[in-house]
């Protein structure tokens, strides 16, 4: 199969239709709107976009966009189509939600670790902490901390609690990484 000097961004001649025309079993015209974005050597790219959006919708979207925006539009469609194939209900929103949940968990863990550092520093530098053993609760916090430690600790914990409740109200549920 010879490459043609072709116009309109065509990479291959009529003997090698683009992935879209091949899947749709039609003749690939020289001015095919799909050809510049769905080359014959990447058939899965168009297959997933076609499965999710449909060829006629993709054709309409590409026709309505200026040529300089089409490549980005195809990249977005391919990304969303692949996400939709993996997660038919939520698509890429599910992946974003899963990542947001991971961020929330890590931020909560970080805030708890920071509160523990404050607790340890206050315990280390307070006169009663250095002179005597401090009885701690099951969570590892002193039963009778000094006022300074208590205020620092609870302000950190309030921040964790506020952050934790605020973000989990909007989460969607189960991890997508288990697919």
Image (spheres, grey):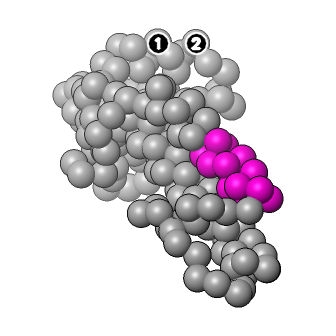
Mark 2 Cα shell of 10 Å, populated few (<14), some (14-19), many (≥20): few
SS majority, magenta: helix
Give the spatial CA distance, label 1 vs label 2.
Answer: 6 Å
Rendering coords of residue 78 (x, y %): 42, 37
Quarter location, residue 133: bottom right
The residue furthest bottom is 131
Cβ atoms at labels 1 and 2 below 8 Å apart: yes
- Considering depth in this image, is 80 or 36 the residue closer to the camera? 80
Location of residue 131 with respect to 177 vertically, above or below: below
Residue in the picture at 62% in, 48% down: 157
Determine the image quadrant of residue 141.
bottom right
Q: Quadrant of the N terminus?
A: bottom left
The number of callouts visible is 2
Mark 2 secondary-structure assignment:
helix
Q: In the drawing, does residue 1 fall left or right of residue 112?
A: left
Residue 149 counted in the magenta span? yes
Towards the viewer: 158 or 127: 127
- Residue identified by numbered label 1: 60
Q: Is residue 146 visible?
A: yes
Q: Position of residue 26 (x, y in %)?
A: 24, 25
Q: Secondary structure at mark 1?
A: helix
Residue 112 spot, x, y in % from top left: 58, 59
Residue depicted at x 61% and y 18%: 65
Q: What are the residue bounds of the magenta stretch? A: 147-160
Dot 1: within a 10 Å radius of its alpha carbon, few (fewer than 14), some, or many (20 or more) residues? few
The image quadrant of residue 161 is top right
Above or below residue 135? Residue 42 is above
Q: Mark 2 — residue?
A: 64
Res. 10 in view? no
Viewer-proximal residue, 173 or 152?
A: 152
């Amino acid at each position: 199969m010879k490459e043609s000097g072709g116009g309109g961004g065509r990479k291959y001649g009529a003997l090698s239709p683009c992935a879209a025309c091949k899947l749709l079993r039609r003749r690939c015209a020289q001015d095919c709107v799909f050809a510049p974005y769905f080359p014959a050597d990447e058939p899965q790219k168009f297959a997933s976009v076609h499965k999710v959006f449909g060829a006629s919708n993709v054709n309409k979207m590409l026709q309505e966009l200026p040529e300089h925006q089409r490549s980005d539009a195809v990249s977005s469609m391919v990304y969303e189509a692949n996400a939709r194939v993996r997660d038919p209900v939520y698509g890429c929103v599910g992946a974003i939600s899963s990542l947001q949940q991971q961020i929330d968990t890590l931020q909560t863990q970080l805030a708890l670790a920071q509160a523990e550092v404050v607790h340890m520093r206050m315990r280390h530098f307070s006169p009663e902490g250095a002179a005597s053993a401090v009885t701690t609760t099951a969570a590892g916090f002193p039963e009778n901390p000094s006022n300074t430690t208590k205020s620092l600790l609870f302000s950190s914990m309030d921040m964790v609690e506020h952050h934790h409740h605020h973000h989990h109200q909007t989460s969607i549920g189960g991890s997508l990484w288990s697919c």
